[in-house]
Image: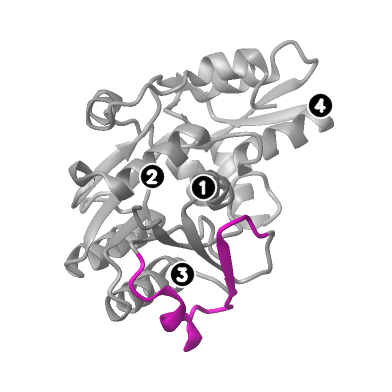
Amino acid sequence: MEKPLQIVITGANGFVAKNLRKYLSEKNVNLISISRRNFKQFKNEKKAISKNYQDKSLLSKIKHSDALIHLAGIGRQSTKTDYELINVKLTQHIVDLSKKAKIKKLIYTSGLGVSSDTSLGYFISKFKAEKSIIDSKINYTIFRPSYIVGKDDLFTKYLKKSIKKNKIIIPGSGKYSIQPVYIDDVTKLIHHSIIERKFRNKIIDLVGPEKITFEKYVKFFIQNRNTQICKMDLEEAYHLAITNPKFDYGIDDLNILIGNFTGNHKKLRILSKMKFQSVKNLLNSGALF
């Protein structure tokens, strides 16, 4: 009988991690999940609570695991947590830990639009994180995702909250494109990337089959609900992002939206041999609400 996989997941409390842990648990994968805060435990799962991932006991817990999926990271900076500290230095620490633990594979979620030419602080931190993984010489798969959507992702939560308030803010024209991908496809794909050799040492755009403008996405989401859509001048949106930490969009949220980043879904489909779900169909059916 084949030995079950043993997989380590960081950032266990996050949206992608929760869905991935549930999916892998149902596939009878043995999980070691790490988070700074306590979380609900699935079957076949051991959990580790660690505020800074520096606990000496972590090394013995994760030793000789088949893969580590690094999902811990931040998308907004503050005076307490910045990109360099979390996205770069924490990733470097996880890489060092993986080498000491003799982990066979690293999987990382970066960001669509990350490249060596970027000038965006968030993308620079993700590029540095990617480089530390590549330089480790451990077998890796790096995914560069667009918006990963489901019932509980941050963007969907924002839209639901805005519908209750009867007002959704769209920065600028709303004509910039996004290429959302459904969470169920993402969890399946990450599982494939652990067990299939064709994902070895690859950087992959993680995008859905459809490009859609931000404005159209919002309209599909709200359907026939009587919700007011308010377009806000970009200059005003950036001003609020800089001066008001409670504003719906952070500076890098706006930068990424306006950046109009899309990827090559055909290449992903051919490599994975998966059929990805239409986000438009999911929106129309109300499955994301």
Quadrant of the frame with the C terminus = top right
In the figure, 214 relative to 133: above or below?
A: above
State which quadrant residue 272 falls in: top left
Element at label 2: helix
Circle on res. 236: none
Point out which mark residue 166 bears.
4
3 vs 4, front mark:
3
> What is the spatial separation of the Cα atoms under label 2 and label 3, in whole angstroms?
22 Å
Amino acid of disc 1? Leu
Between marks 2 and 4 in the image, the one whose residue lies nearer the viewer: 2
Label 2, label 4: how many angstroms apart (C-alpha)?
A: 36 Å
Q: Which residue is mark 1?
A: 20
Residue 264 visible in image = yes
Amino acid tagged 2:
Ile
Cβ atoms under marks 1 and 2 closer than 8 Å:
yes
Front position among marks 4 and 1: 1
Residue at 48% x, 50% y is 252
Structural distance between the alpha carbons of marks 3 and 4: 35 Å
What is the three-letter code of the residue carrying label 4? Asn
Instruction: Specify whether 255 is left or right of 270.
Output: right
Q: Which residue is mark 3?
A: 86
To which residue does mark 2 refer? 190
The numbered mark, 3 or 4, whose residue comes first in the sequence reads 3
